[in-house]
Amino acid sequence: MREILGRRRRLLRGDGRPELISAALTFATEWQWPVLPGATTHPQGHSRCGCPDPECTVPGAHPFDPGLLAATTDERMVRWWWGNRPAAPIILATGGKAPCAVSLPALPAAHALTALDRMGMRLGPVVASPARWAILVKPYSMEQLGELLYAKDFVPGSLRFHGEGGYLALPPSETGQGPISWQRAPLPGSASPWVPDVEAVVDAVVEALTRTGVSAPEL
C-alpha cells in the first residue's frame, strides 16, 4: 500500500510552476471561482493522464483526487493543494456562482469569434486549448439550457455545455492535450470578469457558424 500511495503522490506532484498557484489564488480568492487541482499528466508520457484510466480522453484536464465536490474558494486550501501538487492543472467547477461555459472545436471557434467581432457581440474571457475553445458565460440551469436548445431548429452537435456539476481547465494549466491559455484574456483588475448570458452566446455562435459556412465537426 505504501508503494502504491507513493507512486500516486509522484504522479500528482510533478514539477513546480509558481504561476499556477498565483493564478489559482486569483480565481479563488479575488474572483470567488471555486477551483481544485486536476490530474497531472503521466511522467512517462505527457499525452497520458496521471489518473488510473489508461484510455482517459481528457488527460490532465479533469478532477481526480480530490473529486469535483471539493472545489473551493478557500485560500488556505488552495495554498495547501498547490503547495503539495505544484504542477497540477487548475480546474474550475462550473455553475453555482461561478461562470459556466460553451465550448466548440478550435477551428470553428476561431471563425465564430471573428464573425462575432464583426457583429459587435461583446464577449468575456475565452479559454483555449489546442483542441477546443470555451466561451465563459453567466451561470445557467439545466432547465434554462434545455428550453434554449429546444427552441432552436439546429444546434451543432459539437457544442458542449459546461454547466452546474461540470468543470473546465483554466490557464495557465498544462494538460495532456497541450497548454491551456486565454484566447480572450480577462481585463486586469481584482473584480470577477464580466461574462455574457448563455442565450446570447449560443444564438450568436450558431448564427456565426451558419453565416460563415463553417460546419463544426462532431468532436
Image (spheres, rainbow, N blue to C red):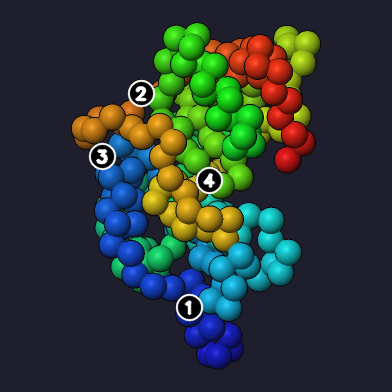
Look at discs 1 and 2 and give the one toward the viewer. 2
Residue 194's disc number: 2
Mark number displayed over residue 9: 1
Kindly tell me whether residue 88 is visible in this rendering: yes
Label 3 sits on a secondary structure element that is helix
Q: Which of the marked residues, 3 or 1, is nearer the chain's N terminus?
A: 1
Asked if 219 appears above or below 180 in the picture, the reply is above
What amino acid type is highlighted by mark number 3?
A: Glu
Q: Looking at the rendered structure, which numbered label has been put on residue 116?
A: none
Residue at image coords 63%, 30%: 108
Residue 162 location, x and y as percent?
A: 58, 35
Instruction: Let me know if residue 164 appears in the view.
Output: no
Mark 2 vs mark 3, CA separation in Å? 14 Å
Q: Which numbered tag is attached to residue 30?
A: 3
> Where is residue 55, by image quadrant?
bottom right
**Looking at the picture, which amino acid does disc 1 mark?**
Arg
Among the two numbered marks 2 and 3 on one chain, the one whose residue lies closer to the N terminus: 3
Quadrant position of the N terminus in the picture: bottom right
Indicate whether 44 appears above or below 157.
below
Tag 2, which secondary structure?
Answer: loop
Q: Quick one: SS at disc 1?
A: helix
Cα distance, mark 4 to mark 3? 24 Å
Label 1 Cα neighbours within 10 Å, binned few <14 / some 14-19 / many ≥20: few
